[in-house]
Image (spheres, rainbow, N blue to C red):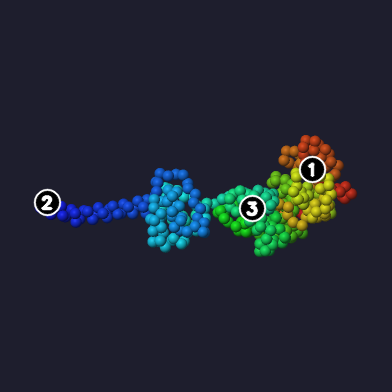
Amino acid sequence: MLRKIILTFLYIFVPLAAVAGAYGAVEFYFLAPADPKASAPVMVDLTAEKGFKALAKELESKGLVRSSLAFRAIARMRKQDTALKAGEYELSASMTPEQILAKLVRGEMVLRRFTVKEGMRASEIGPLVEAAGITSRADFDGALADPALVLELNVPSSSLEGYLFPDTYSFSRGTSGRKIVTAMKQQFDAKWKPDWDARAKGLGRTKHEIITLASIVEKESGNVEEQPKIAGVFYNRLRLGMRLQADPTVIYGIQNFNGNITKEDLQTATPYNTYVIPGLPPGPIANPGLSALSATLFPEQSPNLYFVGNGAGRHIFSTNLADHNNAVNQFQRGGGVSAPPAQPSLPEQATPVPQ
């Protein structure tokens, strides 16, 4: 009887134990996380050149999976070993092999961010992109300088200056400069309201001229409340044939500007020196934000022709040269920066801007 019991045990319970042990091994290597208590993120860079086998070994060496062989088996059983997307990933040892595989297949990469502030030049964006670790400045600047891309993005100029909308952007590492520039122009197009084309036409200006003037307004003041006032001053000057005489335009035309505008700079003819040229420069001098664009399309109606900084981030506006000179004398002593005086031989009163 005892012998029968022993044989029954061996025939029934030993195979069950073997099955249970095999299931435990499968769960340990295939289903369970390498370290359920892990919290620290681990970065993994999956390049196009890196093979799946090498990736699996890297995951094991970094403690993200218990067995590279088991991870490869899961992927191949699901026919996903060739479906992984190259990129930079943030993983954790607390994730199961299935969760890690799913993330790599979905392409849930780490996104790197950079912020373009209102009034930044196109040439200032490349260093931000490079510092974020997305692509090199040379790659980004190369896209900016590509005439074919300018044409493709429907920019009526030889430059994309002014059409790269100020915003916070997120891209994965390795995103090309061309793709980034395209996304920034698309963001500009999305922010440009449908009725603004008709508004620009009503002001007697092209869209490109509006963007150009908005960039000057942006560089003169980032104060949202004052931007319509400043835009109104420039419209009044343009209507009277007065030169804009805006320092930011002069600066834009100077290569390797050192921070100080000299008398010689003001007198040197460049396409952007509005002390010398009449009207608007040939294109934007920076990338204006939404408030500057709106202010330029809907300027404040006033007879003002002059403005001077009060040294506290605001401006004093004047309708005549005498008042303006008094304001300059008062606030320059306190460190204010003035808008340059217009030609005194021209009328001192301007026709109000239409609404």
User: Hey, what amino acid is under mark 2?
Assistant: Leu
Q: Which mark is residue 338?
A: 1
Q: Give the quadrant of the C terminus.
A: bottom right
Residue 181 at x, y percent in the picture: 63, 57
Would you say 165 lies left or right of 31 here? right
User: Hey, what amino acid is under mark 1?
Assistant: Ser
SS for dot 3 = helix
Q: Is residue 291 visible?
A: no
**Circle 2 is placed at which residue position?**
2
Residue in front for this viewpoint, 320 or 43: 43
Residue 49 at x, y percent in the picture: 51, 59
Q: Earlier in the sequence, mark 2 or mark 3?
A: 2
SS for dot 2 = helix
Q: Residue at x 60, y 57 (%)?
A: 176
Q: Which mark is residue 137?
A: 3
Q: Residue at x 44, y 57 (%)?
A: 53
Residue in front for this viewpoint, 155 or 179: 179
For label 3, the crowd category at 10 Å Cα-Cα, with few meaning under 14, some 14 to 19 and many 20 or more, is many
